[in-house]
Amino acid sequence: MKDAWHVGKSIVAVAVLVGLLAVAQLLLFTDTSFYSAVWKAVALAFLVMAALGVGERLWKKAKIKEAGVGPDGANLTFEDAIADSVATVNERVDSHVEDINKRLYDLEKAVFKNEAPSNDG
């Protein structure tokens, strides 16, 4: 089955195109070294990609939970962020592990109830 074209692929394609055009413009029309032109183009492409990605989320009516700049850089969290899903899954896994540990303990008690405890540990 063929993949459907995703908006993210379009965003990356636009960012790469902007980066390539920026390198060409910097090399042809300014007195910039190749190394400097590439890094400036990469930075520009990254900014375009970030702006289009945030814009696409906002276009789909995603609500921003929190935004700000801290010691670790700029942060933007949407309400439907995956962190909420991870927390829910983590709670469920913890609950299941607790249940499995209890059942295992009960099983060990039932199997080894007549044996003397060992001094291994």
Image (spheres, helix red, strand yellow):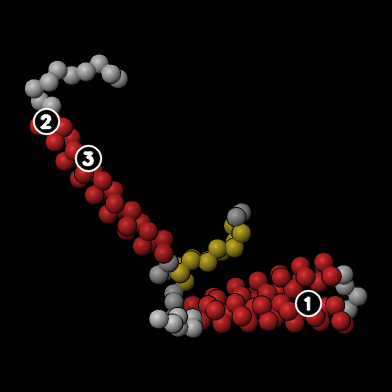
Q: Position of residue 50 (x, y in %)?
A: 60, 73
Residue behind mark 1: 23
User: Along the line of sight, which residue is nearer the eye, 83 or 106?
Assistant: 106
Residue shown at 22% from the left, 40% from the top? 101
Q: How many residues crowd around disc 3 within 10 Å: few (fewer than 14), some, or many (20 or more)?
A: few
Q: Which dot marks residue 39?
A: none
Counting other residues with Cα less than 10 Å from the Cα at mark 2, is it few (<14), some (14-19), or many (20 or more)? few
Furthest residue in direction front, as rendered: 1
Secondary structure beneath disc 3? helix
User: Which is more N-terminal, label 2 or label 1?
Assistant: 1
Q: Residues within 10 Å of mark 1 (few under 14, many from 20)?
A: many
Q: Quadrant of residue 39?
A: bottom right
The answer, for residue 4, to whether it is visible in the render is: yes
Q: Amino acid at mark 2?
A: Val
Whether residues under marks 3 and 1 lie with C-beta atoms below 8 angstroms apart, the answer is no
**On the rendered structure, is 8 left or right of 95?**
right
In the rendered image, residue 10, in percent from the top left (x then y), is placed at 56, 82
Instruction: Specify the quadrant that holds the C terminus.
Output: top left
The image shows residue 96, relative to residue 50, as above or below, that is above
Marks 3 and 2, how far apart at CA: 15 Å
Residue located at (37% from left, 58% from top):
86
Q: Please give the residue where the numbered disc 2 appears in the rendered image.
A: 111
**Residue assigned mark 3:** 101
Figure disc tally: 3
For the residue pair 77 and 115, the one nearer the viewer reads as 115
